Amino acid sequence: MTGKFLKPAVAGLLFAAAGVFSTTQVLAADNVVRHDIPDSDFPVAEGVEVGPDATVLYLSGNVPPVVDESADDQTTAAYGNTETQTRNVLKAIAGKLDALGYGMGDVVKMNAYVATEPDANGVDFDGFMAAYTEFFGTDEQPNLPARTTLAVPQMVNPGWLVEIDVIAAQ
């Protein structure tokens, strides 16, 4: 953006100011740069830059597997609560990434859709976060993705409470 859009002096000040207000993790020889949210310990990156030499994978939305075969597959009884569904969706994503040569630490962007549990007053964001933090921001896997989390009234299958898609890069 420095060429046509910003005068070099202004661009230099903006880039210098950005460096003062955020911390950065540089990974994989500058192919992936993660920017932390300033003054926050929330386990999501403010932004992630993917360099020109990175390989990028777009993984389609994943929904929870059945955990109770005896339950009606159109009910949450078949898939579990929000925390269980989130954990199982993230396990499935981890397995798919692994099969393609990636890991959860390579996830740079996540879109999470969380539905209201039946007879609940809103989505169970605490349950979602309890499972999410088992996979991101841990000592074993500290890399945080940029993330969007949306509350939705219902998924295509009324038993599903969570659907997650990710973009990974290395």
Image (cartoon, rainbow, N blue to C red):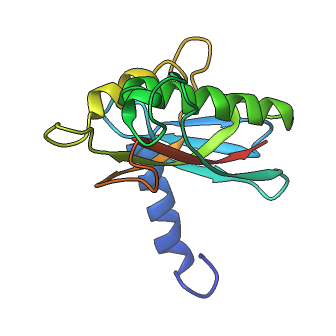
Residue 50 placement (x, y as % from top left): 69, 53
Residue 76, relative to residue 69: is it above or below? below
Q: Which of 16 and 87 is in front in this view?
A: 87
**Camera sees residue 30:** yes
Is residue 2 shown above or below 104? below
- The foreground one among 20 and 98 is 98
Position of 134 with respect to 28 (left or right) is left
Which residue is situated farthest in the top direction here?
139
Q: What residue do we see at 70% from left, 36% from top?
A: 106
Count of numbered tags: 0
Q: Residue furthest left?
A: 121
125 to the left or right of 9: left
Q: Which image quadrant: the N terminus?
A: bottom right
| Image x and y of residue 11, in percent | 51, 70
Residue at x 52%, y 16% (from the top left corner): 138
Q: Where is residue 154 in the image (x, y as percent from the top left)?
A: 34, 53
Quarter of the image for the C terminus: give it. top right
Nearer to us in this view, 124 or 81 = 81
- Is residue 143 found left or right of 114 in the rendered image? right
| One can see residue 132 in this view | no
Looking at the picture, tell me which residue is in the foreground, 142 or 11.
142
Taking the view exactly as shown, the residue that stands out farthest to the bottom is: 4
Question: Looking at the picture, does residue 52 appear above or below residue 161?
Answer: below
What residue is rendered at 50% in x and 23% in y?
Answer: 70
Residue 75: x and y, percent? 39, 38
